[in-house]
Amino acid sequence: MEGVAWFTHKYVMHGFLWSWHKSHHSYHNHALERNDLFALVFSIPAILLFVIGSEFPQFHILIYFAIGITAYGIFYVLFHDILVHQRIKFRYRVKNNYLRRMIHAHYVHHEKRTKEDCEAFGFLYAPKKYDLKQKN
């Protein structure tokens, strides 16, 4: 899933669907952004895989792909929307070094407000160059 997410983020969101994703790179004070449409679009394959896997026994394995996509989506909401961007406000100080590296990589990604010259398109994988300990 991480490879698909990286590719989609770099070549779709920062490519031909930048008109949706740019809302995520812009300051705003409202709860929803156009970028949230991606959640609806990405839920379609999961729903289809659940239906096909449930209705056709020979394709039962597709249910596991649907579970994987759904789990990735849940983790995305919890980590990206809640923990990183604080779309639901709460006080929690991240102590895990890898989670801190992932958050820092995402902040580096957001340093650019345009679709060009961005880096750190991944979500679950953050290279060591984004480790905060190396920055001190």
Image (cartoon, helix red, strand yellow):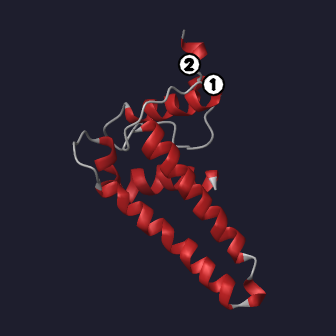
x 56%, y 25%: residue = 130
Residue at the left extreme of this rendering: 29
Q: Amino acid at mark 2?
A: Leu
x 43%, y 46%: residue = 81
**SS at mark 2 in the image:** helix
The crowd level at tag 2 (other Cα within 10 Å; few <14, some 14-19, many 20+) is some
Which image quadrant: the N terminus? bottom right
**SS at mark 1 in the image:** helix
Q: Are marks 2 and 1 in contact (CB under 8 Å)?
A: yes
Residue 93: x, y in percent?
Answer: 50, 25
Above or below 48: residue 69: above
Above or below 66: residue 6: above
Choose top left, top right, bottom left or bottom right for residue 38: bottom left
Residue 104: x, y in percent?
Answer: 50, 28
Q: Which residue is mark 2?
A: 132
Q: Amino acid at mark 1?
A: Asn
Residue at the front extreme of this rendering: 91
Whole-Å distance between the Cαs marked 2 and 1? 8 Å
Which image quadrant: the C terminus? top right
Residue 53: x, y in percent?
Answer: 68, 82
Q: Which label belongs to residue 5?
A: none
Horizontally, residue 133 falls left or right of residue 24, namely right
Q: Which residue is mark 1?
A: 97
Count of picture labels: 2
Above or below 102: residue 47: below
Circle nearer the N terminus (2, 1):
1
Horizontally, residue 108 falls left or right of residue 95, namely left
x 51%, y 47%: residue = 78
Choose top left, top right, bottom left or bottom right for residue 116: top left
